[in-house]
Amino acid sequence: MPTPLSLFATPEKLRGDDYLVATYYLALPSDADVLARTAAFAVGQTIGTWLPVPGVTDRMRAQHEARVISVLSAPPIDVIVGESAEYFGYFVRIAIPTINFGASIPMILTTVIGNDSSTSVQAKLVELELPDSLAAEFSGPSFGVEGLRELLGVVDRPLLLNMIKPCTGLTPEAGAEIFLATALGGIDMIKDDELIANPPYSPVVERVRRFTAAARVAADSTGIETLYIPNVTDRPDRMLDTARRAVDAGARAVMVTYATAGYGALEALAESVGVPVLGHFAGAAPYFEGASTGMSAPLAMGLLPRLAGADMALVTTPYSGYPVRPLQYVRTAHQLLLERPGIRPTMPIIGGGVHPGTVDRYVSDLGNDIVLGVGGAIQGHPGGAAAGVRAMRQAVDARMAGVPVAEAAASNEELGLAVAAWGTL
């Protein structure tokens, strides 16, 4: 039975209307009817049935049914020469009425990747295009790049972030000692590791009190009051309560692992807490690692945390040992930083293997509006944590002045020790 023409539309026909456009990549056997499979998916994820069951009306189809707006062969083969391939690849674009889900990230994801077993295809979501009407309903980051810079008093250089190590097991008193030793180097921000949130042996509120006190002590020497970012990840009700108590105790920012708590939980946190929110990507890999299912990394770690309100968000890189492709790393940063009407940019945090010898690489790739997340290269610096911070700052200052890091290392002891230990990228 031929697929009804009404399930297809041109982009021009739908332009300006309230449709979310989802682009997928899929591979099908060469003898499969890709148009029928794609149309079935579009229907199954909107009104949910091909069959003329009671309750499906023409008005319902017109207002709620998705439309297939393009099916592109990849590679773009129009004629078969020689033997046919066993599988063909396709990029498919489907327009879905926004009336079906509104400004709800959980329901958007349920619609675009929550395909049910009766209509599903193994398709990977690679792009989302939001109409202006839908984008305007998302608050996005409350602070964003400009707000963070204003809060920290840093105009144009990359920001520096450290994370407390060891990851777990430290009492608030022991953690405060490590915090102070690091803050004495003049670092901009220190966050919790993602593996500690609000355990009985180290309550968030107690960490906030002790770490912010340590920040003030360090500021007397450095002139920089390091911003402490506690991890409040938990189930949504407890997370919001913990975050509010942390802010009442003096926290000026909070952190959540959005992939485990949920994008909707991040959105609720960002809209209620009144301070910058750091979105950590822990647990996000299952969203994007599949070659034929899930979504792409630029969506999972870029667009969605930005829409949900993260003011900073971790980005994985090909230089950290994780096998993300360079294209996807850069595109994730683009999703966070590029202009999007009505939504402030989110500052990418580069984490994993960052040290002074990598500064040139990351600034060259992404520009100055980034956070350099440094762990071992600070706590493990031969001269101690404060020296590790100074080495990072010397590398950043050299980059801003256009001085090669090797040249700067010759006249800065802390930077020289770091380059000797870890080299350059």
Image (cartoon, rainbow, N blue to C red):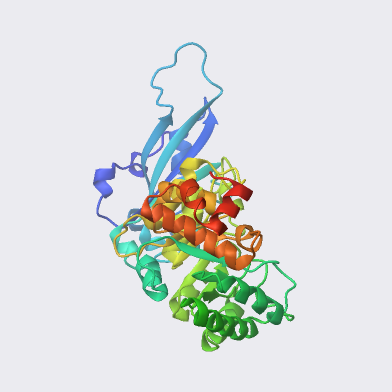
Left or right, residue 93 beside residue 83: left
Image x and y of residue 340, in percent: 32, 58
Image x and y of residue 415, in percent: 54, 55
Rendered residue at 35%/68% (across/down): 146
In front of the other: 367 or 9: 367
Visible residue check, residue 48: no
Q: What is the residue that sits farthest to the bottom in this orientation?
A: 248
Image: 291 above or below 261: above
In front of the other: 346 or 61: 346
Q: Quadrant of residue 342?
A: bottom left
Q: What is the residue that sits farthest to the front in this orientation?
A: 411
Rendered residue at 38%/65% (across/down): 145
Image x and y of residue 264, in percent: 50, 68
Q: What is the residue that sits farthest to the top in this orientation?
A: 82
Image: 285 above or below 373: above
Left or right, residue 250 beside residue 194: left
Image: 1 above or below 421: above
Visible residue check, residue 326: yes
Image x and y of residue 365, in percent: 42, 46
Q: If the image is split into quadrants, where does the N terminus sit? A: top left
What is the number of callouts on the image?
0
In front of the other: 381 or 209: 381
Image: 287 above or below 77: below
Rendered residue at 45%/12% (across/down): 81
In front of the other: 146 or 132: 146
